Image (cartoon, helix red, strand yellow):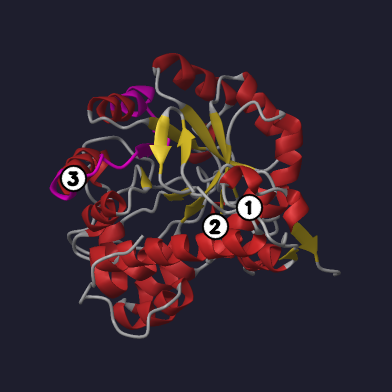
Amino acid sequence: MTLPPHPGVPPGIATLADYETAAQAHLEPKVWRHIQEGAGTERSLAENRAAFARWGFLPRALADLRGGGTGLTLFGHRHAAPLLLAPMAYQRLAHPDGELAVVRAAAALETGMVVSTLASMTLEQVADAGREAAAALGKPSPPLWFQLYLQPDRQDSLALVRRAEASGYEAIVLTVDAAIKPAGITLPAGVEAANLMGMHRIRHTAVPGGGIVLGTPLADTAPRWEDLEWLRSETRLPLLVKGMLLGGDAAQAVGCGADGLIISNHGGRVLDGVPSALDMLGAVADATGARVPLLMDGGVRTGSDVVKALALGASAVLLGRPQMHALAVAGMAGVAHAIHLLRTELEATMAQLGCGTLDAISSERLWAFDG
């Protein structure tokens, strides 16, 4: 697979790490901190990368790679590679085109995109831009999923789901691990949660002499199991739950009707001290018994990372912060280039391991380093 040259990509960008290094110069300091920071001492943030470093490879020699490829089917739709763009809020913080640039890159690379409730463009605008870009390129529309943060009023949550259904989104991703977290960045003029305009949102919770978190509307409206069951009853779209780490929780979510799970610690941004998603994949796979696809989110930066996640039980991975890095550096061209780099590394790693297809990737191809 080759891409036409993109003059907007600076010379010397050859890895996602290069995009991260370059991005700081393109972002306001407060935006850079917002993108990069983790919770607490950032132990969990660091573990997201350290977990990958604990694994090496055992290649098979003289493997037959003829007819190989990285395509897979998720929920009846074809994906060019086991890679989706994770939901990232307020992408206009990184580039004026925001989510529109990202979805156009997704269309060019036939890559799935999960659009955030907190997108800075409406979910309808993003879907339209993806279809238009795909049509101009003579390609199928990129698979689009909608990430849902439950709203204090169920009717507002349902309105978001109905809008996603009407706009052609192919799945709903319910995030359950970030209802209670510190306030984020103060948004600059012109950047807002475009999908939530006119909806009631809980902004202030603590009151003098009262509850700080517990006993406030913020905690009282956090997602519960009955909310998952309600959401399952309200849509026929595939429903994934994002933000689980424990096998027991994962099994219960499947029992409540979840069609897939995204193992994630929210990029280490919510609760410090939790393990990496990669480290928890095996336990979740054991608990769910391959009944639903498992996706992994957190710390993916190279094609070899993708292979390690697949070998440990993931069907696909999600790419988060690197989207913002590439978007800040070179807009749509940067995001497309970053996806291309990651897929190139993925295929090179697979070839070196002797894995011509995704099905050939297994834990037998991994080596655990001591310590």
Query: Which of labels 3 and 2 is toward the front?
Result: 3
Disc 1 designates what residue?
309
Do the residues bearing badges 1 and 3 touch, measured as CB atoms within 8 Å? no
Q: Amino acid at mark 1?
A: Ala
Residue 354 lies left or right of residue 107; in this view the side is right
Report if residue 269 is visible in the image. Answer: no
Residue at image location 46% in from the left, 29% down from the top: 75
Marks 1 and 3, the one that precedes in the sequence: 3
Query: Which of labels 2 and 1 is toward the front?
Result: 1
The image position of residue 209, as x and y in percent, is: 54, 48
Marks 3 and 2, the one that precedes in the sequence: 3
Marks 2 and 1, the one that precedes in the sequence: 2
Report if residue 109 is visible in the image. Answer: yes
The image position of residue 55, as x and y in percent, is: 73, 64
- How far, Cα to Cα, is label 3 from label 2? 35 Å
Q: Amino acid at mark 3?
A: Gly
Dot label at residue 138: 3
- How far, Cα to Cα, is label 1 from label 3? 32 Å
Answer with the quarter of the image where residue 32 lies: bottom left
Where does the N terminus fall, quadrant-wise?
Answer: bottom left
Q: Secondary structure at mark 1?
A: helix
Disc 3: CA contacts within 10 A as few (<14), some (14-19) or many (>=20) = few
Residue 256 lies left or right of residue 227; in this view the side is right
Residue 267 lies left or right of residue 32; in this view the side is right
Which residues are the magenta region? 134-159
Residue occupying the far right of the picture = 370
Dot label at residue 267: 2
Q: Is residue 4 above or below residue 218?
A: below
The answer to whether residue 151 is magenta is yes
